[in-house]
Image (cartoon, rainbow, N blue to C red):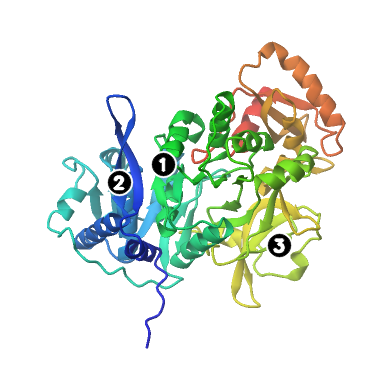
């Protein structure tokens, strides 16, 4: 009798190591030479597989094994890749949290995750000790680097007794077995830990590979560390760029462009803030990137003008794809720059929302009536007609089932389908389906503004004002004005616009508002120097913070 299939996401690595052992899995820039050029350290597939085998054995020797929740706070590096695959190989549960989310949120997230082990660089270990992260539950401490003041042991010490050619058999995991806890970016509140199963990860890899036709042997430039882990699973070589991963919007464009040229990168992921910066630099210096086959951008809607500028660096017919999804479910939909630039951008500018394309083949997507309360079980009368804005709900193999230690959040986000025992995930996003079956995104449910006579949605309203040439971006918020909730537009201008021009720009924006049915009642415009945005992508606007600021300005 054949053994049941293991869904362990780490199983892709030994399979690829057997198929292409000498192909480079990861290039990592570790320092610069005398000519100020980056020098790279590398792992072949065979080396990455072998090193992760050794680390897996070392982890088990100190008690990090199947089911052990393990915080991983290691900066992007060769060790980061090998450690992550080793954790999956032993069946441990990595807990992945953005370190830039702030001390308060970090402490809350770590308390909820109840980690039993903590793997981190010395800087992370110092923070753990200073702020008491995970103190009630941590049993095992492992430092990547010197551990003399951190307690526990070091990666170097646990590897010392393990032979270079040690063979480790990846543990069997079923599709529903917990693989990791990934915390959301917290753009609408305290971050929540989405519980990923091995089946979720496997479905995610398969969907990304199939939707974007990614082949083994391609060269990938991931500018979001977690996405870097998908490359080995798909047989690609990962080029880790020189950048601060917590500030993608401040990236040095030359570091991205030079890496693409040096390694003939074929595919890359970048947040909207990153590709905007690189695209501007490319336009100013007439840069061409002929090796690129595709680029992928997600995290927030990507303005058409940003896509237009970025795609000019590529060969004709090479597209920038903008998948729609969330930490709890990715990908959900996808659309390419060809469709956006030649068709849907014009509807977006008129307030129709942002088209995010068709659902990917593995996803079942519906639009339901807007409701802030729990919805316990699925009923067909929840559905709205095509063209009507409602909440986006999805079901499929890449959709996570629950949040860790957040029962109330799970109840608010999931709808049980009693017909087959499956469930829908409520995306918390609003949108509608057009008559072609495409999905149009209209903003977060929590960000809609319920005024006296109407409800306004962020993305449609903002897009109308974003067409002004001196406006970088806008944000719709609701404020109490004379005892009534009224819509207010916060405005961030392009760099270099003088404050003396504010009155003229305000007049133009008011004229634009009156000319469109959905914005005709908006009469308040406030200029903000730089919107607060999420740490992960530098693109999601923290409208809650802007609403507090706007209320203060209007007093």
Q: Residue 57 location, x and y as percent? A: 22, 62
The residue mark sitting in front, 3 or 2, is 2
Work out how far the residue at label 2 is from the one at label 1, CA to CA, in angstroms: 13 Å
**Residue 492 at what x, y percent from top left?**
65, 26
Name the residue nearer the viewer: 296 or 425. Answer: 296
Going from the N terminus, do you reach mark 3 or mark 2 first?
Answer: 2
User: Which mark is first along the chain, 1 or 2?
Assistant: 2
| Residue 39 x %, y % | 30, 35
Residue named by callout 1: 263
Assign the N terminus to one quadrant of the image.
Answer: bottom left
Please rate how many residues cluster around mark 1, counting C-alpha atoms within 10 Å: few if below 14, some from 14 to 19, many from 20: some
Residue 320: image tag: none
Is disc 3 surrounded by few (<14), some (14 to 19) or many (20+) residues within 10 Å? many
Mark before the other along the chain sequence, 3 or 1: 1
Q: Which of the two discs, 2 and 1, sits closer to the camera?
A: 1
Q: Is residue 153 visible?
A: no
Which residue is found at the position 76% from the left and 45% from the top? 343
- How crowded pointer 2 is (Cα within 10 Å; few <14, some 14-19, many 20+) is rated as some
Q: In x, y percent, where is residue 449?
A: 73, 41
Q: Secondary structure at mark 3?
A: strand
Q: Is residue 168 left or right of residue 406?
A: left
Q: Which residue is mark 2?
A: 42
Residue bearing the label numbered 3: 366
Q: Quadrant of the C terminus?
A: top right
């Amino acid at each position: 009798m054949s053994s049941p299939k293991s869904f362990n996401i780490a199983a892709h690595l030994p399979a690829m190591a057997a198929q292409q052992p000498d192909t480079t899995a990861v290039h990592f820039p570790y320092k610069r030479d005398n000519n100020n050029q980056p020098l790279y350290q590398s792992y072949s597939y065979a080396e990455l597989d072998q090193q992760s085998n050794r680390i897996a054995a070392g982890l088990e020797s100190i008690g990090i094994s199947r089911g052990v929740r393990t915080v991983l706070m290691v900066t992007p590096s060769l060790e980061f890749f090998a450690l992550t695959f080793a954790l999956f190989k032993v069946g441990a549960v990595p807990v992945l949290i953005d370190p830039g989310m702030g001390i308060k949120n970090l402490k809350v997230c770590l308390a909820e995750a109840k980690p039993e082990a903590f793997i981190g660089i010395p800087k992370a270990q110092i923070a753990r000790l200073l702020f008491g992260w995970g103190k009630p539950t941590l049993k095992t401490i492992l430092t990547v680097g010197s551990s003399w003041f951190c307690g526990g042991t070091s990666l170097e010490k646990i590897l010392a007794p393990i032979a270079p050619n040690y063979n480790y058999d990846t543990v069997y995991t079923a599709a529903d077995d917990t693989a990791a806890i990934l915390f959301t970016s917290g753009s609408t509140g305290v971050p929540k830990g989405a519980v990923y199963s091995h089946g979720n990860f496997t479905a995610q890899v398969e969907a990304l590979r199939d939707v974007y036709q990614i082949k083994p042997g391609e060269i990938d430039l991931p500018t979001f560390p977690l996405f870097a882990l998908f490359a080995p699973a798909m047989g690609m070589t990962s080029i880790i760029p020189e950048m601060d991963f917590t500030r993608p919007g401040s990236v040095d464009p030359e570091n991205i462009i030079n890496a693409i040229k040096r390694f003939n990168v074929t595919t890359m992921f970048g947040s909207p803030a990153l590709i905007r910066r690189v695209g501007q630099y490319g336009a100013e210096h007439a840069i061409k990137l002929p090796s690129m086959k595709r680029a992928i951008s997600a995290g927030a809607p990507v303005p058409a003008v940003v896509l237009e500028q970025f795609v000019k660096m590529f060969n004709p017919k090479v597209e920038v794809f903008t998948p729609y999804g969330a930490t709890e479910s990715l990908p959900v939909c996808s659309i390419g720059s060809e469709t956006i630039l030649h068709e849907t951008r014009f509807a977006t500018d008129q307030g129709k929302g942002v088209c995010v394309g068709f659902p990917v083949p593995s996803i079942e997507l519906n639009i339901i009536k807007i409701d802030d309360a729990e919805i316990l079980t699925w009923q067909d009368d929840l559905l709205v007609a095509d063209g009507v804005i409602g909440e986006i709900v999805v079901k499929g193999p890449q959709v996570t089932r629950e949040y860790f230690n957040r029962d109330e959040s799970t109840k608010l986000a999931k709808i049980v389908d009693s017909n087959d025992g499956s469930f829908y995930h409520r995306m918390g996003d609003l949108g509608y389906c057009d008559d072609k079956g495409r999905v149009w995104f209209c903003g977060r449910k929590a960000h809609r503004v319920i005024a006296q006579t109407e409800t306004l949605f962020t993305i449609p309203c903002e897009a109308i004002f974003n067409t002004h040439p001196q406006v970088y971006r806008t944000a719709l918020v609701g404020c109490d004005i004379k005892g009534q909730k009224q819509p207010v537009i916060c405005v961030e201008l392009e760099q270099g616009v003088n404050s003396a021009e504010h009155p003229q720009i305000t007049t133009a924006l008011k004229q634009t508002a009156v000319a469109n049915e959905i914005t005709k009642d908006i009469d308040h415009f406030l200029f903000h120097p730089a919107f607060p945005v999420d740490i992960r992508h530098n693109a999601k606007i923290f409208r809650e913070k802007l609403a507090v600021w706007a209320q203060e300005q209007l007093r």
